Image (cartoon, rainbow, N blue to C red):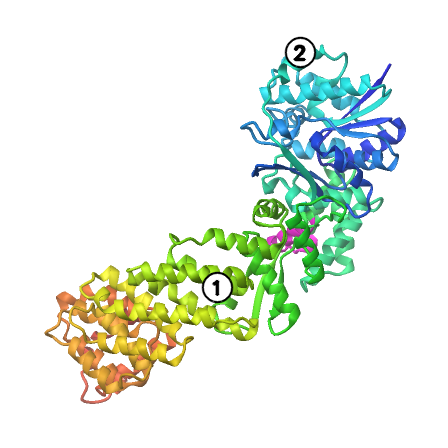
Amino acid sequence: MSEVALLGIRHHGPGSARAVRARLERLRPDVVLIEGPPEADALVRHAAEDGLRPPVALLAYAADDVSRAAFWPFAVFSPEWQALRHAVTHDVPVRFCDLPATHQFAADEPVGQAGASADPLARLAAVAGYDDPERWWDDVIEHRRGDTSPFEVIAEAMTALREGEQPAQRERQREAYMRTVLRRTIKEGFENIAVVCGAWHVPALAGKLPPATRDAAVLKGLPKRKVACTWVPWTHGRLAGSSGYGAGVRSPGWYHHLFTAESDVTARWLTAVAGVLRDEDLPVSTAHVIEAVRLAETLAALRDRSSAGLAEVSDATLSVLCSGDEVRAELVTRRLVVGELLGEVPETVPRAPLAADLIGTAKTLRLRRDALVRELDLDLRTDGGLARSKLLHRLRILGIHWGTREPSATRGKGTFRETWQLAWDPSLEVDLIAASVYGTTVPAAAAAAVRQAVTPASPLADITAAVEDCLLADLADALTDVLRVLDERAAADADVAHLMAALPALARATRYGDVRGTDLAALRVVAERMLARVCAGLPPAVRGIDDEAAERMSTLVDGVQDATTLLDTDARERWLATLGELVDAPRLPALLGGRLARLLLDADRLGTADVEVRLGRVLTAGVEPARGAAYVEGFFAGGALLLVHDDRLLRVVDDWLATIPAGVFDEVLPLLRRTFGAFAGPEKRAIGERAAALTGTAPAVRGEPGIDTGRARAVLPVLATLLGVES
C-alpha cells in the first residue's frame, strides 16, 4: 500500500520551504511530485549542479509562437526548490504534476501557477482577526522555526474552506491531471510518495481518489501545442507581487534573509540595512544599529509577536536608521526588502542557439548580466569598447534591450565614445527566443532582421535609420542591401519632405568611418544624390504653404542644414546656394524666410547689413504685424545673442514693436512670446538693458532730469510680457 504525504505550501515562503525540507528529511520518500509543468521533467537533473543558482525559473513557450510563454520561478526559499534539491541530492525520482503546458498554451486562459478563485488566506486571516492576509500567513507559517509540521493543519483548513466549493473549469483540469499523475505513480510501485503543491489543491488529492474515468473525461479532447522548456535566470524583483507576478510576495529580500540566516535574524538584517545606507554616504553608526534592534524587538513584544517581523524592522529602520526620512526608507525597500539578486544558469542547460551565442559573446567581452542598472562608458578607439558597442547595437536591432544608449551621448557629434545603461531583465530570455527566427548568431540574426524590416515600401526615414543601425552594428553585408533599397526608394519618392526627414540620419552615418573602419564611399554617394534631389525640390515645395506646414518645413530645413556640415564641401555649397536663391522668393512663408536668413547669416552668406535690410523690409508699418512676428520667430529661433550684441538689429526690432497698433499687439503677442520666452533668463535681461539704452532712456528710470519717468515706466509691463519676465 502506497503512503502519500501531501505537503500544502505557499509557492514562495521561507517557513514553508524550511518545513518542506525538514519533512522530506524525515519521510525519505522514494519519489517526489511537484506542482509544475511536466515538460520540465528532463530539466530536473540540472538542479543538482552548483551552476544553477536561484532565483531561477522554468521557461516554457510555444514552439510556433514565442509570445505564448510562461515562467515558473524558484527562489532558494521556494518550497518547490527545496523539494527539487532534496530529490536530486538523494537520487530520488522527481516529477512535475501540473497540467502540461502543451494544453495550457493551446487554451485562451493565462498560463502558469494559479491559486483559488477567492483568496483563502484572506478568509483564514479574517477568522484569526487579521486585516492583512500576508501578515497572518507570515506570523503563522513563514516566521516559524520550530519542528512542528504545519501541513496537517493547512490541509484541515483548506478542506474546510473548499467545502461546497465548485472549482472553475481550468482548476478542475489541473487537479484532474494531478490525480492522474498520482495514480500513475502509485501504479508504478512507489510506496512512499511526497506531493508538494499549492495548499489549495491538497483537498483535491487527499483520501480516496475518484475513479480514473472521471478525471479522464475532464481531460478528454484538450487541445495541444508543441512546447519547449528551459531554465533561465530570475530576479528577486520579479518574484515581488508588485511586478505583476500572480504568486508574488511583497518582500523577496526579507524572505531570503529569513531562510538563510540561522540566528540573530533581526540584528543581521538591520546591520545589512546600515550597510545600504552607508553605501550612499549616509551617517549610520553601530549605536544606531543597536538602538534599531532594541526598538524592533520591543515592538514585536508590544504586538504580541514571537519575533520581529518585516513590519517591526521596517518601523525601526524608518525611525532610527533613516531618522524618519521616507526617501531613505524607500531606498532600503528597493535594495533589501525586495532586492535585485539575479540567479545563474549553467552552460549545460539547453538553450536556443542565439541565446547560447549571446552568452558566449558576452562572456568573451566581459559583459556581466546584472539585474541592477549600471553605466557602461565605451571608448570606441579600443578593440574591447568597439566590440561591446557592436554587440549592444545588434541586440537593439533585434529588440533585445539589454542596454539603453544614453540620450546625452547620442546628441553630440563625437563618435569615439558611447555611454550605455545596462540592466538584464528575465523577460529578455523570451525576446532572445523570439529573435531566434532570424538566425543562430547575434550578427547573422541582426542582419536578417534589418533586411526583413527594410523594403521598397518602407518610409525613407526608416530606411536611413536602418543604414545608421547597420553601421553602428557593423553589418556590412546588410548595409549593401539597405543602400540599394534606399537609392531606389529615394529616386522614386517625389515628396521633398520625406527626403529631408531621411537625410540627417544618413549624414550622421557618414561619421562612423574613422572610428569603425567602415568604407563609406557608397553611403556618401547615396547621401549626395538625396541632397541633390532636396535642393531641386525644395523651392517649389515651400511656396504658398500654410503656417503649420511652414513650421514643419522649418524643422526639416534645420535638420538638413546640420546634416550638410557632415558631408563634403561641394554638397554644403549646393545646399547653401539653394537657400540663397530661396530666401527672397515670392510667396515664401514669413517663418521660413526668417529661418533661411538666419541660417545664411550663420554660414557667412549674408552680412549683418543684408539682414538689417530684410528685417527692416518685413518689420514695417505696411506689412501685416503677424507676418513680421512670424519672420522674427523664424530668424531668432534658437538663440538671442544677435539681439544682445548687434544694436542695429535690436533697433529694427525695437522700432517695429513700437509701431504695432495697440489693437493688433495682443494678436501678435503669443507669437512674440513663443520666440522671446524661449530665451535664457540672462539673455532676456541683457536684451532689456540694451533696449532701454537704445534711446538713452535707461538713466531716466533712475530719475535723471529731462525725462518723463512716468511714460518710461508705462512701457515696462509690456516689455516684461514680451520677454516673459516679471515686471
The N terminus, quarter of image:
top right
Question: Is residue 72 at all visible to an observer of this figure?
Answer: no
Mark 2 crowd level (few <14, some 14–19, many ≥20, 10 Å Cα): few
Mark 1 crowd level (few <14, some 14–19, many ≥20, 10 Å Cα): many
Prevailing secondary structure of the magenta residues: helix
Q: Is residue 180 magenta?
A: no
Q: Which residue is mark 2?
A: 214
The part of the chain drawn in magenta is 318-336
Q: CA distance from mark 2 to mark 1?
A: 62 Å
Residue extending farthest to the bottom is 705
95 w.r.t. 547: above or below:
above
Q: Which residue shows up at 59% across the image and 50% down it? A: 439
Three-letter code for the amino acid on which mark 1 is drawn: Glu
Question: Is residue 591 at all visible to an observer of this figure?
Answer: yes
Three-letter code for the amino acid on which mark 2 is drawn: Arg
> Circle 2 — which element?
helix
Q: Where residue 108 sits in the image (x, y, percent)?
A: 53, 28
